[in-house]
């Protein structure tokens, strides 16, 4: 990429066109469906950001989670009179209920994110989930995961330090990074370390002494069986601590304040946003610094960072178009939007496929989150992506559904959200072009690059004797499994 002069200044209006609109659609959301691109082109970048983030769209707590919380309360009451064997059985029942609810939560979230109006907001929520990492395998409670995610959602319009304060004392975070084990006389450094390294400053911008002293300042938080976080004064170390050269009787708010006085704090989140939305390689510090300075001057406002980033000249530079590999989540939800399909109302035929593609819902492998980039692609995950495409192009086998899945499908049909696979009419509409134009037509519809030359070569290997609907499905499977479709 050639060096841009003033890279974070707004893109001139004269350079706004269908191509820049497609690029914004591919990065801010999950799909470049023509209707989405047309809406973005009409609104412009600033108008799109206002429509996408100007008002938070609530994702109401799923009914399955509410029901689970009620059952957990009943189990806890019953355990008080149970013997050891009965308690063990009840714990197993509670965990089975949590696992079932977690699966339904994943489906409910995908339904919410699948709505193009919600997609930019939810992708931004995912970005912060990949910075402030918690995982189901460490929390084991979908209600706590929902509350954690919702804290991100409802604080998107506030300064980043405020979001950091809120997330620090959620039940999910207190459990995941062992804050409930961090007490006076026996500090646990897990949360303090990740607060500095992964959430706010980045590696190398603190000392081990800073971590030890911060851990003391962060003592006193516990989470009870009702998933409530409490500050227990007797467990808090009230002695003086020295953090980044400053000494005082510090607590959580003080630590956050001191963290955001460090020069690295202004660069950290903008660089993370670059890696998530622009290029996995990141940008040099001298390129990031003007954005960092502007963000700091705004009081670390999340809306300011988002607005500056997505309207900037560098964001639309041609070097960064079509250069990122879609995450499994973007691939899955983008497919549904591209093909105008609904989320199948069962984890087994929907979100379980995310795990096969390498990104299980709300369950990254460790506190560093998803590595991403080329790591998304290997023989197993490519095969899983192709299987996902095939599952959307052929009618699902209803005779293989269990009773709960049949009930869920019937409810979806009654609600009018029953478009789970591509219909013959959709296939005919997609292939209404002249034979020689099929590759270009598909590329213009589904590929950021818009070039059908690579696809034309792939289509030649489809057997010539495969005709009719079967050939259409074979062509579409090839097109949506091709390398160009994995890019955004």
Image (spheres, rainbow, N blue to C red):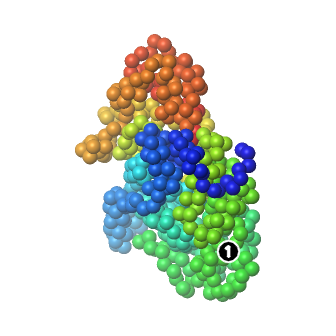
- Left or right: where does residue 137 sit relative to residue 404? right
Q: Residue 306 location in percent, x, y?
A: 56, 59
- Residue 251 visible in the current orientation: yes
Q: Residue at x 50, y 15 (%)?
A: 463
Q: Nearer the viewer, residue 13 or 431?
A: 13
Q: Residue at x 47, y 58 (%)?
A: 50
Q: Residue at x 59, y 50 (%)?
A: 12
- Left or right: where does residue 56 sit relative to residue 293? left
Residue on which the image places disc 1: 261
Q: Can you tell which quarter of the image residue 403 is in?
A: top left
Q: Nearer the viewer, residue 367 or 373?
A: 373
Q: Residue at x 55, y 18 (%)?
A: 461
Say if 211 sits above or below 26 in the image. below
Seen as rendered, the residue at the extreme left is 414
Q: Residue 248 location in percent, x, y?
A: 67, 86
Q: Residue 213 location in percent, x, y?
A: 69, 78
Label 1, residues with CA under 10 Å away: few <14, some 14-19, many ≥20 = few
Seen as rendered, the residue at the extreme front is 14
Element carrying mark 1 = loop
Q: Residue 369 location in percent, x, y?
A: 59, 55
């Amino acid at each position: 990429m050639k060096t841009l002069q003033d890279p974070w200044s707004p893109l001139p209006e004269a350079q706004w066109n269908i191509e820049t609109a497609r690029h914004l659609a591919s990065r801010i959301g999950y799909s470049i469906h023509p209707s989405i691109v047309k809406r973005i082109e009409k609104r412009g970048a600033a108008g799109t950001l206002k429509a996408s983030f100007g008002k938070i769209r609530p994702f109401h707590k799923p009914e399955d989670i509410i029901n689970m919380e009620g059952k957990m309360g009943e189990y806890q009451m019953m355990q008080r009179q149970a013997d050891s064997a009965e308690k063990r059985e009840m714990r197993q029942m509670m965990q089975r209920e949590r696992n079932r609810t977690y699966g339904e939560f994943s489906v409910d979230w995908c339904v919410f994110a699948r709505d193009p109006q919600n997609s930019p907001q939810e992708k931004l929520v995912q970005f912060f989930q990949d910075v402030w990492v918690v995982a189901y395998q460490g929390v084991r409670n979908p209600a706590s995961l929902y509350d954690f995610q919702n804290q991100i959602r409802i604080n998107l319009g506030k300064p980043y330090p405020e979001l950091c304060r809120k997330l620090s004392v959620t039940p999910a975070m207190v459990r995941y990074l062992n804050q409930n084990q961090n007490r006076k006389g026996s500090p646990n450094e897990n949360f303090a370390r990740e607060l500095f390294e992964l959430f706010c400053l980045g590696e190398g911008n603190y000392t081990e002494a800073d971590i030890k002293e911060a851990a003391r300042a962060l003592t006193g938080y516990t989470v009870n069986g009702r998933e409530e976080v409490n500050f227990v004064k007797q467990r808090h170390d009230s002695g003086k601590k020295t953090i980044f050269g400053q000494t005082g009787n510090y607590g959580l708010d003080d630590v956050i304040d001191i963290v955001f006085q460090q020069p690295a704090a202004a660069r950290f989140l903008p660089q993370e946003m670059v890696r998530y939305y622009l290029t996995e390689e990141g940008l040099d510090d001298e390129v990031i610094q003007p954005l960092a300075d502007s963000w700091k001057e705004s009081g670390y406002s999340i809306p300011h960072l988002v607005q500056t980033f997505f309207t900037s000249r560098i964001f639309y530079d041609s070097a960064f178009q079509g250069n990122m590999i879609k995450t499994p989540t973007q691939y899955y939800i983008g497919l549904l939007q591209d093909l105008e399909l609904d989320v199948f109302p069962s984890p087994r035929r929907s979100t379980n496929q995310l795990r096969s593609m390498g990104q299980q819902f709300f369950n990254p492998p460790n506190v560093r989150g998803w590595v991403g980039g080329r790591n998304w692609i290997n023989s197993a995950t490519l095969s899983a992506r192709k299987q996902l495409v095939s599952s959307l192009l052929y009618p699902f086998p209803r005779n293989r559904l269990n009773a709960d899945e049949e009930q869920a499908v019937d409810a979806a049909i009654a609600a009018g959200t029953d478009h789970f696979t591509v219909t013959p009419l959709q296939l005919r509409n997609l292939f209404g072009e002249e034979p020689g134009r099929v590759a270009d037509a598909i590329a213009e519809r589904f590929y950021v690059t818009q070039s059908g030359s690579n696809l034309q070569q792939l289509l030649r290997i489809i057997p010539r004797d495969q005709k009719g609907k079967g050939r259409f499905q074979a062509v579409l499977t090839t097109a949506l499994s091709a390398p160009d479709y994995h890019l955004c």
